[in-house]
Amino acid sequence: MGKTGLYSVLKIFLDCVCVCQSNGRVRAWAVKDDEEGHLIYRTGDVLQDRYEIVGTLGEGTFGKVVECIDHHRGGSRIALKIIKNVEKYKEAARLEINVLEKINQKDPENKNLCVQMLDWFDYHGHMCISFELLALSTFDFMKENHYLPYSISQVRHMAYQICLAVKFLHDNRLTHTDLKPENILFVSSDYTVTYNTEKKRDERCVLDTAVRLVDFGSATFDHEHHSTIVSTRHYRAPEVILELGWSQPCDVWSIGCILFEFYRGYTLFQTHDNREHLAMMERVHGPVPSRMIRKTRKQKYFYRGRLDWDESTSAGRYVRENCRPLRKYVMCETEEHHLFFDLLEGLLEFEPDRRLSLSAALRHPFFNPVRDPEHFSGARDISR
């Protein structure tokens, strides 16, 4: 074998082998992926001679998120998103990195509550992005808490922060397109426990409702191609279902659905079918506006200018039993609860051009008690 061939073999070997030093011992292993393209790793593995893996935080279609000790940042803990070694996910990661770099440029002091990217690199075909380490998502906290809803004061503080973060994106000509409780993370999910004697169970109350917005893998600039379908089903706006085109208002609709879920503990539109989804929307908000019906290419959902829906079927009964007009969901007849539903009605307006802007939402009287900077420093406890 000539020098060139020997060099190539040696380079391949070095590319495929990593060395980790732990407790004075050196061990080596081949970099391998599983059949789905996930990086195979173990606790204690070190990536880039810097990131020591502590454990897995979560997993998605894109790859996995692991907690690491960053030895270049004084041993601080960070979250590392390791993308599958699959081209479509790698390309999505490159787009996400582009968005995150723009966010860092526009908001270097991280005042707008979007998760902060610390670093990114390509690790043997896996795009990796490091972030500040956050706590449980607002969904996971609720799930672990028997789907107990958040209190109205907690909803208010989280809602204000979400509107602030997403407004920042909108001001920079971005649409998030995948807003949901799983993508809103607590900075700290520490909690107190009280025993509910009526339900005979422990219930948690989060101590600090400071949150961050995460997952910009589907975020889209105004000038970029807009996919026909965006958003996770339960948070999908009517203009997306009807393929009327979308922009920033589709995020506003998603926020309305999220805030309802925080308030009640369950999703507003529990369905997986477009026609049924539209029927639920009509049950909650009234008829689909005729202008939207006339414009949509999805005429199969309508008959003579109205939604083609039979309330006498099992699906019709399901919608009737599981959905009711929005104001019927009010849990308390105090002013703050009614102000909250007044805000929801603006966020969940059918027509996107009539939907409340986030600038207007932030000025809504529901937010009067939290419209000061102390709430974002964690200095004040505004939980229950």
Image: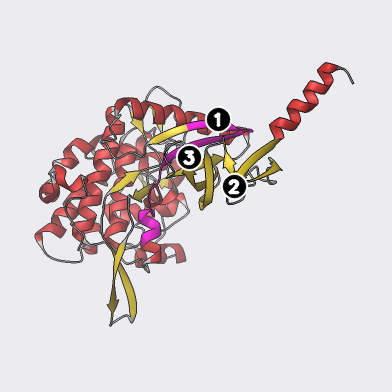
Q: Residue at x 21, y 40 (%)?
A: 356
> Which residue lies at the image location 30% right of the left edge and 29% below the top edge?
108
Instruction: Give the camera-side residue of 168 and 366.
Output: 168
In the image, 273: left or right of 141?
right
In this rendering, the answer to whether 197 lies above or below 384 is: below
Can residue 349 be seen by looking at this rendering? no
Q: Nearer the viewer, residue 365 or 16?
A: 16
Drawn side of residue 218 relative to residue 345, left or right = right
**Gap between marks 1 and 3 measured at Cα:** 28 Å
**Circle 1 sits in a helix, a strand or a loop, which is it?**
helix
Q: Is residue 187 visible?
A: yes
Q: Earlier in the sequence, mark 2 or mark 1?
A: 2
- Identify the residue position indicated by label 3 in the image: 71
User: Dot 3, how many residues are within 10 Å of its Cα: few (below 14), some (14-19), or many (20+)?
Assistant: some
Image spot of residue 161 (x, y percent): 24, 45
Quadrant assignment for the N terminus: top right
Residue 68 in the image, given as x and y percentages of width and height: 49, 46
Q: Which residue is mark 1?
A: 91
* Distance in Å between CA atoms under marks 2 and 1: 34 Å
Front tag of 2 and 1: 2
**In what quadrant of the picture does the C terminus appear?**
bottom left
* Residue wearing tag 2: 22
Q: Earlier in the sequence, mark 2 or mark 3?
A: 2
Q: Which residues are magenta?
A: 120-141
> Could you tell me if the residues under marks 1 and 3 are in contact, i.e. CB atoms within 8 Å?
no
Residue at figure coordinates x 25%, y 55% from the top left:
208
